[in-house]
Image: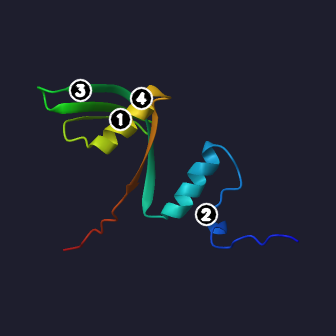
Amino acid sequence: MTKKKSSTNEEHQTHYSGSEALETAQATQAGADFEWHLGRVTRMGNFEIAGGRQVSIIWEEGGVSSQQGEIADEQWEIFKLAFLSTGRIAVLQQFEIKQATKR
């Protein structure tokens, strides 16, 4: 007797392996209102006196981000894991469409 496949999870299954297939699947699920930003965590620090934690990221599309303080525990753990492994990080950001108004 053959088993039937469940159709409820079929739309979320990835049929290819690798980072490119994962990125494509995640982008498809996110929709058109989201944009991926890829970068590398280059520096991390923990400064109790100077405002807490600090993270620096170099982005593939150009530019550098650095934040000191106000980094949540969950964010800190993600940055730490990225820094201790390959250093690579991907951030999915919802972008706003701003309409220009004529006057």
Write the residue at 80% across / 70% down.
3
* Residue assigned mark 4: 83
Contact between labelled residues 4 and 1, with CB atoms less than 8 Å apart: no
Badge 1 local density, few (<14 within 10 Å), some, or many (20+)? few
Disc 1 to disc 4, how far (Cα)? Answer: 18 Å
Residue 97 drawn at (x, y percent): 34, 65
Query: Of the residues under marks 1 and 4, which one precedes in the sequence?
Result: 1
Point out residue 53 in the picture as x, y percentages from the top left corner.
Answer: 23, 32
Q: CA distance from mark 2 to mark 3?
A: 39 Å
Q: Which callout, 1 or 2, points to the residue nearer the camera? A: 2
Query: How many numbered markers are drawn?
Result: 4
Whichever of labels 1 and 2 marks the residue nearer the N terminus, that label is 2
Mark 1 to mark 2 CA distance (whole Å): 34 Å
Visible in this render: residue 40? no
Q: Earlier in the sequence, mark 4 or mark 2?
A: 2
At a point 64% along the width and 50% down the height, the residue shown is: 21
Q: Which residue is mark 1?
A: 63
Mark 4 surroundings within 10 Å by alpha-carbon count, few (fewer than 14), some (14 through 19), many (20 or more): some
> Marks 1 and 3, how far apart in space?
23 Å
Q: Nearer the viewer, residue 2 or 71?
A: 2
- Residue 54 horizontal side relative to residue 84, left or right: left
Secondary structure under badge 4? helix
Q: Which labelled disc corresponds to residue 12? A: 2
Spot occupied by residue 11 in the image (x, y as percentages of width and height): 63, 67
Which quadrant holds the C terminus? bottom left
Label 1 with label 3: CB-CB less than 8 Å:
no
Q: Amino acid at mark 1?
A: Gly
Mark 4 and mark 2: Cα distance apart in space = 29 Å
